[in-house]
Amino acid sequence: EEGASYWTVRLAWRAFGGACATVIFMYFWTYLVHLRTADADFSFRSTHLGKFSGVHGQVIPAQLTFHIWDFFVFAAMGTMGGVVGALWCEVNRLINLCRNRWLRGRVMQCLVILLNVLGMATLVWFLPSTYSVCGDLPDVVVEGEYMAGGGGAHSSPYLESFRQFDCPVGQYNHLATLLLNSPSRTLNLLYWEDGSRFSAASCAIAGTVYLLILMIGFGTSIAQGIFIPLLYVGACYGRAFGLLIGNQDVQCYAIVCSVAQLSGVARVLISITAIMMTSTGLPQLVTPFMVATIFARVSGKWLLGQPGIYDIILEAKGIPFLEETPPRVLEYHGLKASDVMTSPVVTILPQTRVGDLLAILNKYEFILDFVVTDPSRGGRLVGLISRDDLINVLSCRELFFLSGDMTSEKAAQDDLPSGMGALKFSELTKRHFRLGEVEGSLGADERDKLVNLTPYVQIAQCTFDQNGSASRLYELFRLLGLRTMVITGGSNGNETDNCTVPVGVVQRHDLKEFEHLASELKHIAPSTTKTK
């Protein structure tokens, strides 16, 4: 919701319903798992959905406190999180560019995955044996009773999190515990254990290892996320920072620094603050979260001038996501719609030869929506038809007809010959064909036939005058969620029809190019530009 440029009530209901169905399914799945353990009286607790409120059996501090001067520490954490996040995003972007250029194909992708897995497994198993720091098992709560030193012979998910590795019996390896558990379980240890549980060096090493693995692996053909791993990295650095400055109450630092690290990479403010406030159950930390996220966003943007990782992914995928405000170059130079539109317009007729449609689709692969005009009415705009809809129409041979099937060449556009209503618009959207498949299945006789596109054209399209402001055009794209806008204002010999004659089109990609141009013209003073 925070990053969407076009938000509707329908989309909100979809997200709401999807989240509700996901949680309910998780409840049922967890219940079925516990039925196998004969736990018929199983009831749901908040910790069952991955909330960071501790592991079962863990001794949780009564409350987390911070002082007024800690806000300066939180601001410093946010700044460092933004700097590290900006560097992480830039290095990951360069790695993905090289990977997409040199390591293409399924075989190479499989090889990259194997190398990543091999490197990760080597690090997480080799480092704990190289840097081995042992500690005594912590106190535990077993069946409501407090037991010191691990609770003797009792075992719990909490105690199982502490890995003995190469340490003596009754002790655990710091680095093995941090690296050989799942990140979600380790997060609870980093959030709630006291300062003596893990050394500063162990936390710094574990955080750096995860940061490097995530930097190299993110963008490969591996199903992975960055939310929990980045929280893990920030929690490690937060604990290490607290221990280095001599503060043993490192829980607060670990939680706030994890938020700062995630915000430094994702550059999201409101969502991260709300998620972490509810998942940790610590509403008193909402202001530290806000301070950390704000400083992380500002410092990350200031360092390299690049957006967050999600915007980088959109740009790498070629998705033209438009920012909230129009590029300054559109306003300072007083550009009009005619300055940003693509002209001349590639138009097609309501009734077109099949072979001509195939030639147009092959020639103009970059056009997503084609303009349909009526030459019998002076080139007036009829509407738009998308590239996918054109391919789907061509896949239905029942819609083809010969020119002699029409009672008159001047018949109305909605007068269809018999048998031409074989494909409804609702059925059209369910078809998924590629142009090569359709083109290969059509013979020479079928290519000479005509097809009537009128029932599948999106009529009553939003149009924009060629003399209108390009900045206002940009706002309409975001406000209405448009992909293509038809620019009108041409002349067909009748001044009253000028507003319906297309002279150009503007797509989201055209406006996106001006955002890159605006970043290159930052040195131009606004007053000087306006005067020019």
Image: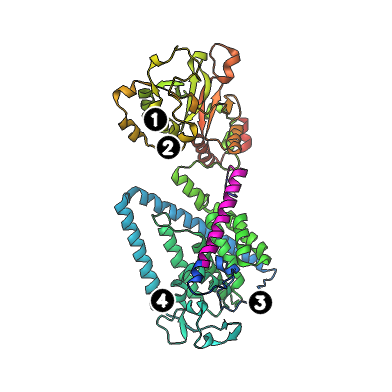
Residue where numbered disc 4 is placed = 128
Residue plotted at (45% across, 65% down): 210
Residue type indicated by callout 3: Ala
Residue plotted at (35% across, 59% down): 113
Element marked by disc 1: loop
Q: Which of the two discs, 3 and 1, labels the residue nearer the N terminus?
A: 3
Q: State the separation of the CA atoms marked 3 and 2.
A: 59 Å
Query: Which label belongs to residue 431?
Result: 2
User: Dot 4 surroundings within 10 Å: few (below 14), some, or many (20 or more)?
Assistant: many
Main SS of the magenta part reads: helix
Tell me if residue 475 comes above or below residue 450 in the rendering: below
Q: Quadrant of residue 472?
A: top right
Q: State the separation of the CA atoms marked 3 and 1.
A: 69 Å
Query: Does the magenta portion include 97?
Result: no
Residue type indicated by callout 2: Arg
Coordinates of residue 84 in the picture (x, y in percent): 51, 60
Element marked by disc 4: helix
Q: State the separation of the CA atoms marked 2 and 1.
A: 10 Å
Q: State the separation of the CA atoms marked 1 and 4.
A: 63 Å
User: Dot 2 surroundings within 10 Å: few (below 14), some, or many (20 or more)?
Assistant: some
Residue 267 seen in the current view:
no
Which marked residue is nearer to the observer: mark 4 or mark 3? Answer: 3
Element marked by disc 2: loop
Residue type indicated by callout 1: Cys
Tell me if residue 519 comes above or below residue 378 in the rendering: below
